[in-house]
Image: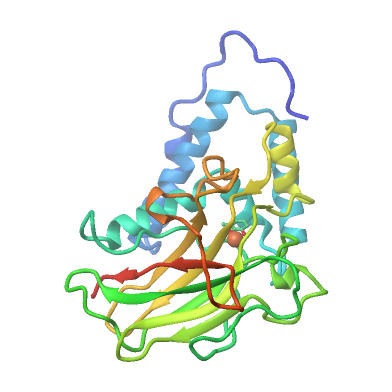
Amino acid sequence: DISGSVSEKPTHKFDPDFTQNVINAIGPKASPRLRKVMGSLIQHIHDFARENEITVDEWMAGLELLNESGRMSNDRRNEGQLLCDILGLESLVDEITYKLVADAKDGPTSTAILGPFWRKDAPRRKMGETIVFGIESGDRTYMHGQVIDYRTGKPIEGAELDVWHTAPNGLYEQQDPDQPDMNLRGRFTTGKDGRYNFYCLRPTSYPIPFDGPAGKLLQLLDRHPMRPAHIHFIITAPGYKPIVTQLFDRRDKYITNDAVFAVKSSLVMDFLPYKGDPKADFELAYDFKLASF
Ligand code: MBD
Ligand code: FE
């Protein structure tokens, strides 16, 4: 419970040397980067506690939230990441990382956060195959395009596209015992023409898992847990900087109101009606642009 009233004016004088003493305790063998990052963290976290007059009870309530998120986490659930996501921290570090990677404004495809549901070793599939198994509902979508070098526009051979998205019930395969293992996931490798194509679903908006500390915090903050419909990608290619990203559906109700603040305008897409293919009702065309090292 952190609903107590705020006192009017802090009258207490803190020891002015206290925080610096704690920072100075870092020993000579700590790496320079760790010294800098932890020194800064200690400074900010002390300032935060002083500014907000954090009490022992409030600090304990925060710790309990973190401990509970640790207890809930396993290789199918990353509650700490979810907590960071709803506070915008994963999107912020993604932006910071991307700033260091991207070297032009109209350059490579923008990044978006990885999120907690990527799995390594998704099945390798052949071009033109589907990633949808054992699901009757949902709008079938034909997704296709090219992986190209953003500077030259040339197709990239041997690029790997790793894709994953939720089922119409709003669950990723590892959250849902009714879906086959690795459903709605796949890895595709481009040939000489850099082209890719596969069948997936037009995704739906869905709530991030809210049965744990992240959900509790959302509730306390009077916020919703919804993410706009999205498809995740990791694009890698020899000689190129990897891109972790998501594509979003422009018509989604939550497109301007993502619970984890990941939407970028260049990643908002139009799913178009697709005629003449019995396997799909919608089409999504997108070219991924990579930057060479
Ligand atoms: C998701 O599906 C997701 O993509 C992110 C970033 C966070 C929580 C759930
Ligand atoms: Fe997701």
Quarter occupied by residue 5: top right
Q: Residue furthest front?
A: 276
Q: Position of residue 289 (x, y in %)?
A: 30, 69
Q: How is the image coloured?
A: rainbow
Of residues 216 and 6, the one drawn nearer to the viewer in this rendering: 216
Horizontal arrangement in the rendering, residue 149 relative to residue 33 (left or right): left
Is 232 drawn above or below residue 192 in the view shown? above
Q: Residue at x 50, y 77 (%)?
A: 162
User: Ligand 1 is located in which of the four quadrants?
Assistant: bottom right
Q: Where residue 274 sits: x, y (%)?
A: 52, 68
- Which residue is situated farthest in the top direction here? 8
Q: Quadrant of the C terminus?
A: bottom left
Residue 143 in the image: state x and y as whole percent.
Answer: 49, 72
At a point 75% along the width and 61% down the height, the residue shown is 169
For residue 103, what is the image quadrant? bottom left
Q: In terms of depth relative to the viewer, which is nearer, 77 or 107?
A: 107
Residue 118 visible in rendering: no
State left or right for residue 59 relative to residue 16. Answer: right
